[in-house]
Image (cartoon, helix red, strand yellow):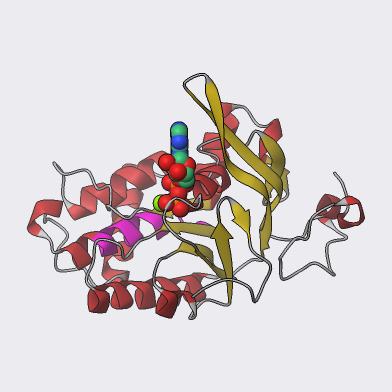
Amino acid sequence: MTTSASTSAPVFGALSSDNSSNGGESGLIVARHLDYTVPVGSQSLKILNDVSLEVSPAEVLAIVGPSGSGKTSLLMLLAGLERPTGGDITLNGQSLSGLSEDGLAELRRQAVGIVFQSFNLVPSVSALDNVSLALEIARPDLKLSECRTLAREALEEVGLGHRLEHRPSALSGGEQQRVGLARAMAARPRLLLADEPTGNLDQETGARVIELMFSLARKHKTAIILITHDPVLAKRADRMLTLSKGTILPPGTGAA
Ligand SMILES: Nc1ncnc2c1ncn2[C@@H]1O[C@H](COP(=O)(O)OP(=O)(O)O)[C@@H](O)[C@H]1O
Ligand SMILES: [Mg+2]
């Protein structure tokens, strides 16, 4: 829609000199000048202020920042789960602002996997069913038997081939998050969004989950936006951005 020449704030991305195609954007996901304000009683609270970023295909971006800086809100916008009050996001060359709720859900199903801090597994069904149910929703073109085969493969890929019939409560935290990872990756999204995925795990287990996430992403050429409090994990990403009070700090000025 617009070119970078007309922007008023810097876009801290990997492709800033190569955005001539695809309507001016060549990143897998490009966010420009996002504002996010929510009503609180009779007032309004500005959570994000002029946030711009872009992530290339297969790139791993870490976002760090103190609690309350707006990281989860940013991830919700990038996932199309909430709409920004200003600015725009393009995913796979498609502007999210022009999409209906159904259109957003469809794009999300096709292109995005999400891993949550609290795993968000369905407690009453097995690991296999958790992954298979997500695939049935993401890939209505597949038969049930195909979904189950892919779900089994996704769980084997995260080392849980021997835990297919276990319910989440019978799995350790690290195992539950590996189910979460298998579920997020089973439909082969181009973008994986992870919001403090190691926040409920001890450091060693968390590091192993991240290692697995990075190696799966490399194998399947999936881009990752990883929100983390852990500077050691963040430094393992290709690039790191720091969010502070709803604004992205210029490179080199952040903590961590
Ligand atoms: N829907 C909402 N209504 C009101 N305040 C919110 C809402 N969502 C987030 N906030 C506030 O916005 C700020 C940023 O929240 P959040 O994005 O969760 O930050 P982080 O993930 O970095 O901890 C916090 O002060 C939080 O309380
Ligand atoms: Mg958060």
Indicate left or right for 176 with 44 as reference: left
Say which quarter of the image contains residue 181: bottom left
Indicate left or right for 87 with 75 as reference: right
Say which quarter of the image contains residue 99: top right
Q: Is residue 16 magenta?
A: no
Report the residue at 60% width, 45% height from top.
48
Q: Is residue 190 visible?
A: no
**Residue 166 on image: x %, y %:** 11, 56
Report the residue at 22% width, 47% height from top.
129
Residue closer to the observer: 227 or 125: 227
- Taking the view exactly as shown, the residue that stands out farthest to the left is 170
Q: Is residue 181 magenta?
A: yes
Report the residue at 22% width, 53% height from top.
128
**Residue 52 on image: x %, y %:** 69, 54
Indicate left or right for 95 with 43 as reference: right
**Residue 133 on image: x %, y %:** 30, 43
Q: Is residue 77 visible?
A: yes
Residue closer to the observer: 51 or 30: 51
- Quadrant in which the N terminus appears: top right
- Taking the view exactly as shown, the residue that stands out farthest to the top is 42
Task: Point out the stretch of residues depicted in magenta.
Answer: 177-190
Q: Main secondary structure of the magenta part?
A: helix
Report the residue at 34% width, 50% height from top.
147
Residue closer to the observer: 61 or 176: 61
